[in-house]
Amino acid sequence: MAEQTEKLTDPRWAWAAYEPDADRPWNLARAGHLYRRAAFGASWDQLQQALADGPQRTIDMLLQPQGDIAGFNRTYDEYEVATGSVDQLRAWWLRRMIQTPHPLQEKMTLFWHGYFATNAEKVKNTQLMQQHVRLLRSQALGSFRILLEGISQDPAVLIWLDAEANRKAQPSEYLARVLMKTFTLGPNHCTEDDIRDASRAFTGWFVLRSKLRYIPREHDDGEKQILGQQGNFARDDVTRIILEQPATSRRLVHKLYRWLISETEQPDEALISPLAESFAKDYDVQKLVETMLRSNLFFSAAAYRRRIKSPAEFAIGIVKALEETVSTTQLANDLADLGQNLYNPPTVKGWAGGQHWINSTAIVARQNLASALLQGSGPYDNKLNPWAVAQKHGCATGESARGFLLDLFLQGDLNSDVYITLPNTPREQDNDLGGRIRSLAYAIVTLPEFHLA
Amino acid sequence: MSYTRRNFLKAALGASTMLSLASPGPNLLVRAATAGTARRDDRDTVLVVVQLSGGNDGLNTVVPYDDDEYARNRPTLRLQPKDVHKIDSYLGFHPRMEGFLRLYKEGHLSIVQGVGYPNSDRSHDVAMRHWHTAKPEDPNCQTGWLGRAADSVWHTKQKDTPAVFVGPIVQPFGLRAEHVIIPSIQSSDDLTIDPAPGESQPKQAVELSRADKDNPLLNHLRDCTANARANSRRIEAVARASANKAEYPAFRLAETLHTVARLIRADIGIRIFFTELGGGGIGGFDNHANQLGNHCSLLHHLSESLAAFVDDLKKDKLLDRVLLMTISEFGRTVKENGRRGTGHGAAAPVFLAGGKLKSGLIGSHPSLTDLDNDAMKFHTDFRRIYATVLDRWLGFNSRTVLDRQFELLDILNV
């Protein structure tokens, strides 16, 4: 990755669309990078197609893939509606991440799940949790305005935030507090008075028998003052006023920067401002995501391997590369042990992510998960078979399979001193070539480099 | 001496000599934070929490055997003076707690009496939540006190996991953290690296790339991977060395504490262990009917498991680094309920075990006549124990974790 550090802080250059040149060629490493961020990793065919199509056309396809996406999602929605437990919802979602024709949509649904973090253990209602994530998915690349309005009247969110009964005499301040301080403006952009009056605007709304209900006599229709505006505000005025604050858009752009570009350092305000200003005009999520993905900054050294994969990204990256589906019921449990219990983010702030994913015990657990996935027996059965995948893509020898797997998982981007210590090239006369290659694949996906997105 | 007078004297003495404000302990936090990549300090202390799920009947655990009020209120559940293991002329341990008596006599067990909190709740979920969040006044609190403790000492170069839950049930809320991932394990095997697929033995591990000055994330992964390998080997070595040596009874809690002892011995940097007795859900200590037999067996498990744990740690002079503490969501009603059981109460004793305890009996036994809704009243807020453990034992900052400064208890020899 060639450096252009002096240009990285120039927003015009940073957010302009990347065009490959001699210094920054379109190659396997950049294609792998794009698929790690905009999807959950890539298969060999996807990497090859991306190389042939070039970056901008590949991004077109990631934003607007072909195929019956609505039909796919409808089918999975039906599966989910038929389940009786959050454990099964977790399994269906992981399966969706693996099989979806629109991986960017699932990737962004996962982003919103951490952003509007709502915890099933507290909500205690499978159906409401299913509806909640469905709402996130429906606007994953849609309108932040519609999403925020949906969140402010989502029964799961109201239960989670102790706001099932917003009585006139006893407004639920916690909902307004989280909505303003965590979900939108951020901690230093509103006062206790703003929160109190916003919670008064929410009065009248109840969750009764899992349904949202409005009881007019419980609504406080008195005058309120919220973020400098005065009026007899109701719920929808609160979201409107929040969306008029520049802090809302800026905070979202910051979070998305961390999700799509880099976790290592806080970006310059100069980089954030143009995106935040443009986002505030229409709250079009897809446009914002698109700007980031297409950018020079996204394909620069400042972004490359500057995120740590969440447990789901780590595991699904292995599964996608090996072109199969594994038991996602088991996988959901294993990911929970790694700290990412889907449908159960730890607090309203979601998963802290980044370096927090990793400590010594997390490494042990990730290695043991990789071992189980590649074992060829046990809970994940014989679904993932690296030798078979290598053969499918034209590898006839152990030597060629070794090179293939390094390209598949790491796009060959590995220090040479690490490369030479990887398990020896398996020889054809070895009577357990398949087993040797499993062991080699395990050695690759447990390298520190593979944990980086 | 009449009961009331003795009670009064105990309360008066307790307040002046035992519950006085202690001086802050050595600042281990600073040391931990500056240690960076250096070798861990061998003197790092360890906290082990044992949760007694369901609400333990303190009155039949530490028994005021000579109190007429006890006899009068417990016609069928009463434990006889001749059967209890006497601590003094007023109190004795439950007859099946031989281990606790021995630990007490050796100075390795303390009883903090009359522990609770203001306006305590009597539903299992809410009360246990209060003990877990340590913020009963904040119904929206989303983190546990030990989760916050782990978060409070996190730094970007931290490789070791600061806390683990050992047990088969869902991880208790007390460990809920905002940032740090706290694993749940069932045995020390869960913290060792399995052999690669197709291998029966762990192989020589792949070389790791050199430090990359430009990528802190890669460096962190690299350091943690190296550390994970080293820790895994240490745990395996300890497991091999102590395979048949330690003597633990065949109880689940004993097995859990055996795992904890192994991990302390392996010295892999875990400062906080959380364990549990009584099972998930409401918990085995909740005995509304026919309490005697069930409670007896749970207390026996508790007492003998702890005694084996303490003995095991003593062998390698590790006991001085370890403090164990029991928690339970509430005590029980003084009066039994007509079904040979008891209802949900309030104040109850907290047990501490370890090598650095100051005195055996801390605070007075709460009155059996001055009751709040049939339950004994507390005089020591449980958060004073938490604060003491955080500040003086772990060297963390209790104010950061508990949001205010609770008065510390002078219960530790540190």
Image (spheres, coloured by chain):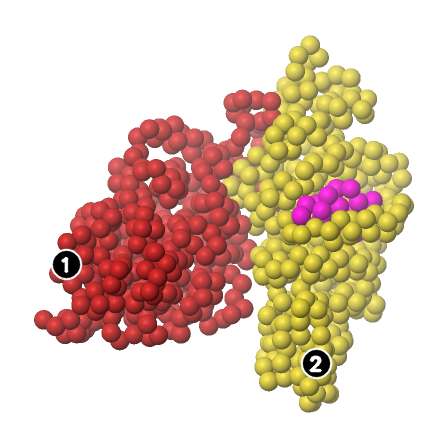
Chain colours: A yellow, B red
How far across and how far down the image is residue A408, in percent? 74, 32
Whether residue A434 is visible to the viewer of this picture, yes or no, is yes
Q: Is residue B270 above or below residue B233?
A: below
Determine if the magenta segment contains residue A346.
Answer: no
Q: Amino acid at mark 2?
A: Ile
Q: How many numbered dots are placed on residues in this image?
A: 2
Whether residue A446 is visible to the viewer of this picture, yes or no, is no
Q: Amino acid at mark 1?
A: Asp
Q: Is residue B353 above or below residue A202?
A: above
Q: Is residue B261 above or below residue A428?
A: below
Q: Residue furthest front?
A: B338
In the shown orientation, is residue A282 left or right of residue A150? right
- Name the residue located 33 percent from the left edge and 28 percent from the top edge: B244
| Magenta range | A88-108
The local secondary structure at tag 2 comes to loop
Q: Quadrant of the N terminus of chain A?
A: top right
- Name the residue located 53 percent from the left edge and 52 percent from the top edge: B180
Q: Which residue is mark 1?
A: B88
- Name the residue located 49 percent from the left edge and 71 percent from the top edge: B138
Q: Quadrant of the C terminus of chain A?
A: top right
Q: Mark 2 falls within which chain?
A: A
> Mark 1 vs mark 2: same chain?
no
Q: Which residue is mark 2?
A: A215
- Name the residue located 34 percent from the left edge and 56 percent from the top edge: B290
Image quarter of residue A281:
bottom right
How far across and how far down the image is residue B123, in percent? 45, 66
Q: Nearer the viewer, residue A132 or A401?
A: A132
Majority secondary structure in the magenta region: helix
In the shown orientation, is residue B351 left or right of residue A86? left
Q: Is residue A333 above or below residue A392?
A: below
